[in-house]
Amino acid sequence: MSLQSLLSIETSGPGLYEFTDRVAGFLRDVAAEDGLLTLFLRHTSCSLLIQENADPDVRRDLDAFFRWLVPPANDPAMTYLTHRAEGPDDMPAHIKAALLPVSLGIPVVDGRLALGQWQGIYLFEHRAAPHRREVVLHLG
Amino acid sequence: MSLQSLLSIETSGPGLYEFTDRVAGFLRDVAAEDGLLTLFLRHTSCSLLIQENADPDVRRDLDAFFRWLVPPANDPAMTYLTHRAEGPDDMPAHIKAALLPVSLGIPVVDGRLALGQWQGIYLFEHRAAPHRREVVLHLG
Amino acid sequence: MSLQSLLSIETSGPGLYEFTDRVAGFLRDVAAEDGLLTLFLRHTSCSLLIQENADPDVRRDLDAFFRWLVPPANDPAMTYLTHRAEGPDDMPAHIKAALLPVSLGIPVVDGRLALGQWQGIYLFEHRAAPHRREVVLHLG
């Protein structure tokens, strides 16, 4: 038996968008018991991420680190980039999408995600313009 | 029910090698319906990657970024490395293999990969010498 | 049918702790045949990693690379960090936990992990203080 669903997540600029509650809601809706939940992101310029859900400074600092590691394409450090047609945030978004997860597997125990106490599920948007992002949920 | 297969991929130097079609072919061969496809790479000096399959500049820039982030061991920035016996591309290959996926889970819907429109599946080779790489496919 | 278990791993400072044997032991205990083993880490300041199990220099160099990429919060390069309440190793640990896997899927063939010859399974601890870490195993 496997169950699938599609979540749509609206983003408005770079940063972390938590959607743990929507995933837990899917498990309730299908009356999940034990199993494995897989999340799969259908994009190459944003990422999935499991991170601390307590102090918002952690999310801000994560964002700052990735901006330091992969600056916009018009930064003097990035002159080696050639893919520039879609704006200075485009190729850096692809690089961050390579560095961070596109799929995640999370065990489900008694219908609940086996997350640790401080773990939340996030979509990490890397593009500046608003986007509608799709995450496939698979319960098997 | 679970079905497994082994893909062999020949590489000839660093870069991205697409094999989306071979994965789709496996799903056709086994008459897959709904499920979860897991790809697992049996190596520690190359990676799996889902990335944009449209503009080849994206792949070139990804390659350039990772060469900037992890230069060869004979680069002045890398004097802290001690594992040097197998050549200047060896330890950087292990580092890139740590930073990029060794396994990927992709939902299958009606026998087709639930990839987004712009997503392709790649093997990212990090070594200079030709290699034969093995990817285990698991459909469950 | 799905089987789950919880491994506890004690750590005493940053570095790689191999636990391949304990995962293989779980498969023996449950008389696994073919399937997919998923490992999921219930923390946001350490990581899972599949890496070379032969030369210990590889682990030392991996550790050195990540210390170079994400220095402690009291390093002059890290002045942009704001989350500092839990010590100089805390926010860098979250960043490394974002860059490295929190979940891994490994096919199981005839009761054995489909790992390559040189692959071992590690917990990568990013914190200085001793910790007890939990890894959920799911066999499906």
Image (cartoon, coloured by chain):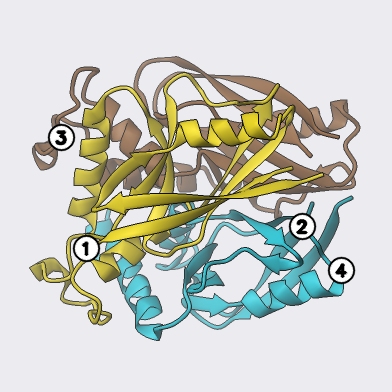
Chain colours: A cyan, B brown, C yellow
Q: Which residue is mark 4?
A: A30
Disc 2 crowd rating (10 Å Cα; few below 14, some 14-19, many 20+) is some
Residue at x-position 18% and y-position 23%:
B84
Of all chains, the one bearing label 3 is B
Q: What is the quadrant of residue B104 in the picture?
A: top right
Callout in the foreground (4, 1): 4
Q: Are marks 4 and 2 on the same chain?
A: yes
Q: Position of residue C44 (x, y in %)?
A: 42, 65
Please state which amino acid type lies under the numbered disc 2: Asp
- Count up the numbered dots: 4
CB of mark 1 within 8 Å of CB of mark 3? Answer: no
Q: What is the quadrant of residue B87 in the picture?
A: top left
In the rendered view, does B61 fall on the left or right side of B92?
right
Residue at x-position 47% and y-position 43%:
B59
Mark carried by residue B124: none
SS class of the residue under badge 3?
loop
* A24 relative to B15, above or below: below
In the rendered view, does B48 fall on the left or right side of A37?
left
Please state which amino acid type lies under the numbered disc 1: Pro
Callout in the foreground (1, 3): 3
* A118 relative to B123, above or below: below
Of residue A65 and residue C25, the one placed in the foreground of this image is C25
CB of mark 4 within 8 Å of CB of mark 2? Answer: no
Q: CA distance from mark 1 to mark 2?
A: 51 Å
Q: Position of residue C39 (x, y in %)?
A: 56, 47
Please state which amino acid type lies under the numbered disc 3: Leu
Q: Which residue is mark 3?
A: B81
Sequence-earlier tag: 4 or 1: 4
Q: Position of residue C70 (x, y in %)?
A: 23, 59
